[in-house]
Image (cartoon, helix red, strand yellow):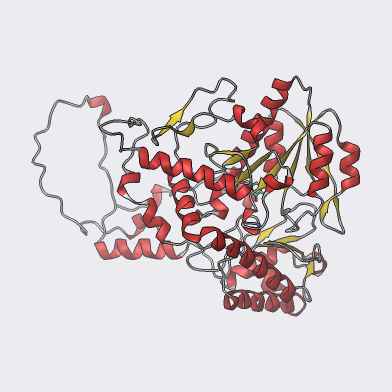
Amino acid sequence: MSVIFEKSVRGRRGVDLPKCDVPSKGHIDEAYRRGTSLDLCELSELDVVRHFTALSRKNFGVDNGFYPLGSCTMKYNPKALEAVARLEGFTDLHPFMPQLRHGGMLVQGALRVLYELERLLAEITGMDAVTLQPLAGAHGELTGMMLIAAYHRDKGNKKTEVLIPDEAHGTNPSSAAIGGYAVRAVPTDKKTGTLDLEALEQMVGEQTAAVMLTNPSTLGIFNSDIARIVEIAHEHDAQVYYDGANLNAILGRFRPGDAGFDVVHMNLHKTFATPHGGGGPGAGPVGVKKHLVDYMPISRVVKRDDNTYALDYDYPKSIGYIATFYGNFMVCLRAYAYILMLGASGLREASGHAVLNANYLMNRLKDKFKVAVPRTCMHEFVLSAEAEAEKGVHATDIAKALIDEGFHPPTIYFPLIVKEALMIEPTESESKETLDAFVDAMLKISAQVSACPEVLTSAPKSTPVNRPDEVKAARDMDVAWPRDNHEQ
Ligand SMILES: *Cc1c(COP(=O)(O)O)cnc(C)c1O
């Protein structure tokens, strides 16, 4: 496919601009003037529309196909929420607008949304208070680590390390490290797919600042030992952190706060109506128990006695700012509307469907692919393509072949503790027909592993680029179009 400049034909016009009727003012110094012509491309309107429509079709998104990217929860987000996020009363706000003026109605609605969303998320997770400040899941983890550090500092606790399961998302150890702690990996019991309790008991001690747990884990398993884990940690005055990025598996069924967790983060841009990796800001709100409320970041949204809302900054023990303003307000707004739209019973139904869909897929695939932990899963499960790899077809080849079948590949090579991992998360929004079509594609690929492996190892055939050097693409990216190609 050519770039738009290559389609340019001199003199062809899409629009005619009227002659400038504004008198030119002042004089631009010669040094700042462009020496050459602008050299814009020249095309008809039809050419432009076709060019960009063709480009948009090269993109893969939830709107055009199944996207079972494990851990990322690429589910369908209702379009009604986009309409809510586009309401003028919200989009036309400026962060420096006064909170109260002329009756104070300009930003009161937005503050109310933030206040009520905090209360809703606190209710959903069973925590005492929530901050909407963090701008991503990883940012929420870091905020949580800073809160825990502030708590220990205040109590005079000398704590040096954080314990994290070896199957955790990579952001967990990095957040703990940036939070100032040494990280120690707790092994996973290979049979149950959950944290090795005995190892945890041996590793935990006075030096432990926190135990960080992802539940359901990245293997898609609900850890039924959490009561004991919380107890073990609390015996040593260690805080227990709940990575709630997988909240879509437990909505309306289990609350981390009820199980004794001290801190939890959520990913609004996974569970609550904004796609993960959407390229925009995200939201990783953090919920805490009472004993951590004083340390929460500023600003905080408060409701005053006269029922007005305000941003409050007067918290002497606060860890301070972790973000400025609320640049992710539209993400919060969509989450708020989504929660109200579904209601308590709808959220419960969503988690039920997420788990049902994952188990359906896992059971339909388990005869042809090895399941990493063969037991009832939550919202996602992990396959291991170890046997296929011995025949020369690796997890990455299966992923690439799925592209030719019209599906987005699952997450691969994560979690790290599973060889040739394929991590599949169907999400709650997919129909049985879609899941069946995906199974058909996977079974077809499975048959090809022995019959015609070269079809898989040379896939994808249907994309403009076949197999880029991914390291080079990340480290040495060059997306500039060589202007020398441009004949004028
Ligand atoms: C996605 C995810 C994170 C990180 O969230 P980001 O918003 O991508 O920073 C952390 N933990 C788990 C388990 C996740 O799935």
Can you see residue 53? yes
Which residue is at 25% across, 32% downward? Answer: 102
User: Which image quadrant: the N terminus?
Assistant: bottom left
Q: Nearer the viewer, residue 60 or 468?
A: 60
The answer to whether residue 426 of the structure is visible from this angle is: no
Q: Is 97 displayed left or right of 468 in the figure?
A: left
Spot the residue most to the front.
305
Q: Which of the 4 image quarters holds residue 240?
A: top right
Relative to 397, does residue 481 appear above or below in the rendering? above
Across and down, in percent, residue 232 comes to 84, 39
Q: Indicate left or right for 195 with 432 as reference.
A: right
Give coordinates of residue 130: x percent, y percent. Answer: 57, 39
Q: Nearest the camera: 15 or 171?
A: 171
User: Residue 260: x percent and y percent?
Assistant: 73, 43
Q: Count the labels in the image.
A: 0
Relative to 349, residue 276 above or below: above
In-front residue for pair 97/430: 97
Between 113 and 244, the one lying in front of the other is 113
Residue ID at (22%, 26%): 30
Q: Residue 418: x percent and y percent?
A: 79, 57
> Quadrant of the rendered structure where residue 205 is?
top right
- Dividing the picture into quadrants, the one containing residue 145 is top right
The residue under the point 56% across, 47% down is: 121
In the image, residue 15 sits, relative to residue 100, either above or below, namely below
